[in-house]
Image (cartoon, grey):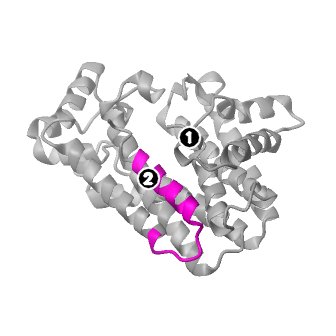
Amino acid sequence: MNLAETLALPPLSRDLTRVESALHRSVASQDRFLGDVAAHLMEAGGKRIRPALTLCAAYAASSLAGPSTEGAVTGAVAVELVHLGSLYHDDVIDEAATRRGVPSVNARWSNIVAILAGDYLLARASSLAASLGADVAGLLAATIGELCRGQVLELQHLFDVDRTEEGYCSAIEGKTASLFATSCRIGGMVSGADEPTLDALARFGFHLGMCFQIVDDVLDITASDAELGKPAGQDIAEGVYTLPVIYAIAASPDLRELLGHPVDSEQQARARQLATADGAVEAALGVARDHAAKADEALVGADGLDTNVSDALRRLVAGLVTRDS
């Protein structure tokens, strides 16, 4: 999905270019090695959906008067740095070999380098948030805590064939939806939006994040390596049983018996086949669509938001729930 094309907001493409330049400046270091490692995944690209949400929330709260303020760009950079830092740590946890079609930092250098570089990105994000005020800094710090909570909760249920839907949802609320919500709230905060508007923007971001993660988890068992930019079926291989797999386990004794421990490539392929049968994928997408509807409702029910921006964000939601097609 091309965000600028989907959202079709005149200032967005140029503002995302500003964000990209600021991202690279933010990780520059007198230590050339640290700077290179910190910029590694940044240079591999990415959707930049979180900074785009910050920019769009700022547009929505300020009637799309023109290019984003420096505060909105700084907020957008901060949330993307948190996301990138979390990816460095995730790849160590997952022992991932690739990310975004390039070698992961841990594979190219080492786990220690990846962890320290991830910490550096989080530190740079915190510094930028502090420059926007104590309220933004406090919000971002709390969000980093939520990311950790979600990841730890997920790790507690690796290879758990009895993982519940409630446990899954709690984990992705922390590791994904919280940062989406914060991305939107920060955009409103730097634009002076009132509390009801901030709550509406955060609610939109939260449900969008839930939808995004569920669809992403569906794609992990339905898409190809080339479509994902990383090996497909990795969640099953790593023992992370996501919503479609949870539904499929409940309906398939064969899948329950197959899982619960590490699997080889042949077993992984069989597990993906079983997980995509008997309506499990469609049931998971139904939950994603429910969150998409709630994200839509958050914007429709909010006063004081620019109508053109709200409509654009609703197009983004509609595009996310069709990513599997």
**Which image quadrant is residue 17 in?**
top right
Number of marks drawn: 2
Give whichever of 21, 316 is nearer the camera: 316
Mark 2 / mark 1, whichever is N-terminal: 1
**Which residue is pictured at 66% across the width and 55% down the height?**
55
Kindly report the secondary structure that dominates the magenta region of the rendered protein: helix
Q: Which residue is mark 1?
A: 5
**Which residue is pictured at 11% across the width and 45% down the height?**
251
Q: Which mark is residue 141?
A: none
Is residue 99 at least partly visible in the picture?
Answer: yes
In the rendered view, would you say 134 is above or below 72? Answer: below
Residue 73 counted in the magenta span: no
Q: Which residue is mark 2?
A: 317
Secondary element type, mark 1: helix
State which mark lies toward you, 2 or 1. 1
**Which contiguous range is marked in magenta?**
300-319
